[in-house]
Image (cartoon, rainbow, N blue to C red):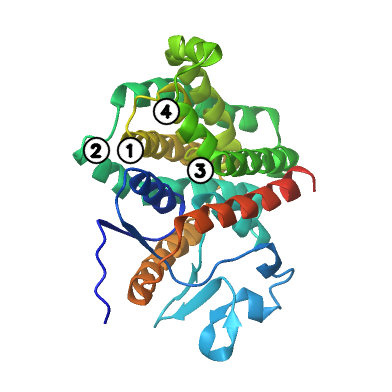
Amino acid sequence: MAQLDFDYVIIGSGFGGSVSALRLSEKGYKVLVIEKGKWFTGKDFPKTNWNLKKWLWQPNMKLFGFFKMTFLNHVTVLSGVGVGGGSLMTPILILFGFPNHVAIGTDLLYASITKMGAAVFHTRRNNVNWRIVALLAAGSIPASLLTSFALRSFFGDANEYKHLLTTSLGIMLILTALVILLRGFLRSSATREPGRWAQLCQRHADAITFAAGLFLGVFVTLSSVGAGALCAALLMTLHSRLAALQVVGTDIAHAVPLTLIAGLGHFFLLGNVDFKLLACLLAGSLPAIHLGSRLATAIPNGVLQSILAVLLLALGVRFAWP
């Protein structure tokens, strides 16, 4: 067996894993990303779940889709395979037939739970700028709660605000895709001598960070998308002195309470959380990680980011302009 030497091994190519791999590689570390499945493009997604070849992952039956079913004694686990991203969870659930409000509310709680481990990791390594987290949260947490209250107060049921959720999801997916595509420009801008506009923004960085928190609080609650990529882009632009690992750590440390509060708001105020679905998502992530680590499939980071951006952009256009 070939002997490989890596500084970091990241299991799972979701948003947290892919961003961590990107930032570590930018710092000069050798990074291995492990995932199960294959690279998916727009043409790989089935139009109906009757297309088993593109829907289920069972290579010994010539099925190469993105869902795998694991049959246990008393439960069947549905898990995802292949290069993914946290931003893909909600649109995939909607395409799978779950109502928009249930997909968004459940995904918010799922994101908060799955990001907690990464938040603890970065906290222990002093990769979190808690002052910036506090500025973001001061805007995002109240905005998230007010958004949930507004949905309950001004709409009779979920069907009345379905269009608002769908449009918000599409817009946030498009913005996330653009951030990923422009990551090189943002990274180089952060290292260059700031121009007049950048200097103005940096002088008012605290106020802009708070305002960005308000924006994220509203739209993450409406779409479950944006707490990661958009926040990371903001940190790179406004707080260019942050090291790459601090950008990741601060981003994740803010995403955990935001998605948790937004998810709880969907549950207590709107009743939009399906705990059976949440349990299946959490259970499905365990065998996926185990199987992915055994396959030890290395995903080139540049290809990973490009595919993820194209998928997000395509899904965003579909949801924003149905």
Q: Which mark is residue 249?
A: 1
Classify 10 Å Cα crowding around label 1: few (below 14), some (14-19), many (20 and above).
Answer: many
First-in-chain label (2 vs 4): 2
Q: Which residue is mark 3?
A: 267
Secondary element at image label 4: helix
Measured in 3D between alpha carbons, the distance from the residue under mark 1 to the one under mark 3, in whole angstroms, is 27 Å
Instruction: Tell me: residue 132, above or below residue 313.
Output: above
Label 1 is placed on what type of residue?
Gly
Question: Where does the image place residue 289, in percent across and percent down from the top left?
Answer: 37, 67
Q: Is residue 127 visible?
A: yes
The residue at 70%/52% (across/down) is 314
Q: Nearer the viewer, residue 39 or 187?
A: 187
- Confirm or deny contact between disc 2 and disc 1 (CB under 8 A): yes
Q: Is residue 269 visible?
A: no
Measured in 3D between alpha carbons, the distance from the residue under mark 2 to the one under mark 1, in whole angstroms, is 7 Å
First-in-chain label (4 vs 3): 4
The residue at 58%/44% (across/down) is 181
Name the front one of labels 4 and 3: 4
Looking at the rendered structure, the number of numbered marks drawn on it comes to: 4
Q: Nearer the viewer, residue 215 or 29?
A: 29
Q: Residue furthest left?
A: 124
Label 2 is placed on what type of residue?
Thr
First-in-chain label (2 vs 1): 2
Measured in 3D between alpha carbons, the distance from the residue under mark 1 to the one under mark 4, in whole angstroms, is 19 Å
Label 3 is placed on what type of residue?
Phe
Secondary element at image label 2: helix
Q: Which residue is mark 4?
A: 191
Measured in 3D between alpha carbons, the distance from the residue under mark 3 to the one under mark 2, in whole angstroms, is 28 Å
Secondary element at image label 1: helix
